[in-house]
Image (cartoon, grey):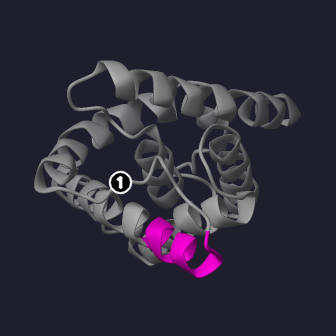
Amino acid sequence: MILAWIVWFFLVPQLFWLDRVLAGTLVRPLDLGLAVCFVLALFARTRALPALLLAAAVGRSLIDDGSVALHFLALGVPVAVLLPARGVFRGIVWQASAAAFLALAVPRVGGFFARITHTGLDAVEPSTVASVVWAAILVPPVGWLMRQLPPLAAFVEVEP
């Protein structure tokens, strides 16, 4: 388990760097931060969530503007909102709805906290209808893939 934590802390910055590189090349880039939030909110062990979110915030702050605290709040608040509905979001329609919610919530929450702290978030762009639809289509399969691969596979909650 310790190896999974070490790999997660070193892999997350590369994941957000890859997201930045892909954003410049793809027509409709997928925000991998949404996929990370999706997996953490719906499938990760609740006891591991704070450290997993902290690693994601550190990785995102290394690549994008804003402090670690700002990214922790931008990613953590939507995850916290979805946590009570974990049992509901098991079907693909519900997962697509959760992905659409994250596509709407993460940029708005990030923008809200950026305005409060007077810092910029370049990577957080306002949500458009197309970005929400693309997130609803692409985030559940990418989230499934992330749940199957290490290191996130070690942190997925086992269903009874």
Question: Where's residue 137, x and y in %?
Answer: 18, 41
Main SS class of the magenta portion in the image? helix
Q: Which residues are magenta?
A: 109-118
Which residue does the image show at 70% across and 40% down from the upper left? 62
With respect to residue 100, does 80 lie above or below? below
Which residue does the image show at 37% across and 29% down from the upper left? 23
**Is any atom of residue 59 visible in this view?**
yes
Which residue does the image show at 31% across and 57% down from the upper left? 103
Type of amino acid at the residue the image marks with label 1: Glu
**Is any atom of residue 159 visible in this view?**
no
Q: Quadrant of residue 75?
A: bottom right
Question: Where's residue 84, x and y in %?
Answer: 45, 77
With respect to residue 78, does 98 lie above or below? above
**What residue would you read off at disc 1?**
125
Q: 141 or 110, which is in the foreground?
A: 110
With respect to residue 139, does 14 lie above or below? above
Which residue does the image show at 41% across and 28% down from the upper left? 145
Q: Is residue 117 magenta?
A: yes
Label 1 SS: loop
Q: Quadrant of residue 104?
A: bottom left
Left or right for 61, reference 104? right
